[in-house]
Image (cartoon, helix red, strand yellow):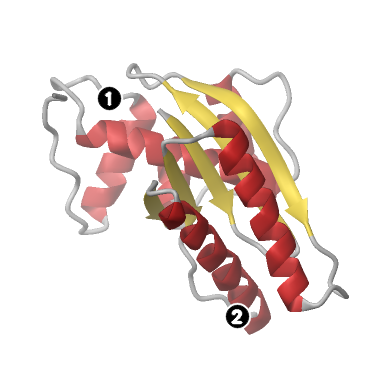
Amino acid sequence: MRVLGIDPGLTRCGVGIVDVTSTRKATLVDVVVIRTPHEMPLEQRLLHVGDEIERLLDEHQPGAVAIERVFAQHNLRTVMGTAQISGVALHLAAKRGLVVGLHTPSEVKAAITGYGSADKKQVATMVARVLGLAVLPTPADASDALAIAICHAWKRSAAVAGPAGALTPAQEAWLAAERSAGKSAPKRRLAP
């Protein structure tokens, strides 16, 4: 499964593409941080980020798109930019008929590190470990985008996981975090 993960932002938008096998081994395909300057008009910033996401979708042909879910922040301007970029990404994915997953930051952290309150360095460290990278992906927008893509692939594979014990430790931690948060964990079923 090839997943394009997006850490949406108007100034910095992380986009990470990973391939994940049926055994849940993840491999880096590409990672980009799309930047726009504050002084650029809003519509031009949205156009630039959208064009770059579209280019990456066309170039890498993912089977799914994963986006960090917009959540309440104290800075309304940041929330608006994040929501606007998320809308652009959702539009581009829908035009291509791609499966889209929205994942909260704590869900992504739990999937990657086993701890829903992990800090940025812990996430980057685990992303590097999962992908077999010699150095941590930087800036944080890059590692976050890769973590979102991995989370999505692992979550989807957990939903179709086979016999007990077929999940990785990080996936088991994700399922435990979902259960403790009171969410219903995905039903495990055999793959077709």
Q: Which mark is residue 18?
A: none
Q: For the residue labelled by badge 2, is the local secondary structure a helix, a strand or a loop?
A: loop
| Label 2 vs 1, first from the N-terminus | 2
At 60% from the left and 26% from the top, the residue drawn is 29
Expressed as whole percent of the image width and height from the top left, the position of residue 154 reads 36, 33
Q: Quadrant of residue 138?
A: top right
Expressed as whole percent of the image width and height from the top left, the position of residue 52 reads 69, 50
Q: CA distance from mark 2 to mark 1?
A: 36 Å
Which residue is denoted by mark 2 in the rendering? 74
Amino acid type at circle 1 is Leu
Q: Quadrant of the N terminus?
A: top left
Q: For the residue labelled by badge 1, is the local secondary structure a helix, a strand or a loop?
A: loop
Amino acid type at circle 2 is His
Residue 6 visible, this orientation: yes
At 64% from the left and 58% from the top, the residue drawn is 50
Q: Is residue 154 above or below residue 133?
A: below
Label 1 near label 2: C-beta < 8 Å? no
**Which of the pair 102/62 is nearer the observer?**
62
Expressed as whole percent of the image width and height from the top left, the position of residue 159 reads 22, 37
| For residue 187, side relative to residue 136 (left or right) | left
At 57% from the left and 42% from the top, the residue drawn is 57
Which residue is denoted by mark 1 in the rendering? 167
Residue 120 visible, this orientation: no
| For residue 118, side relative to residue 170 (left or right) | right
| For residue 9, side relative to residue 163 (left or right) | right
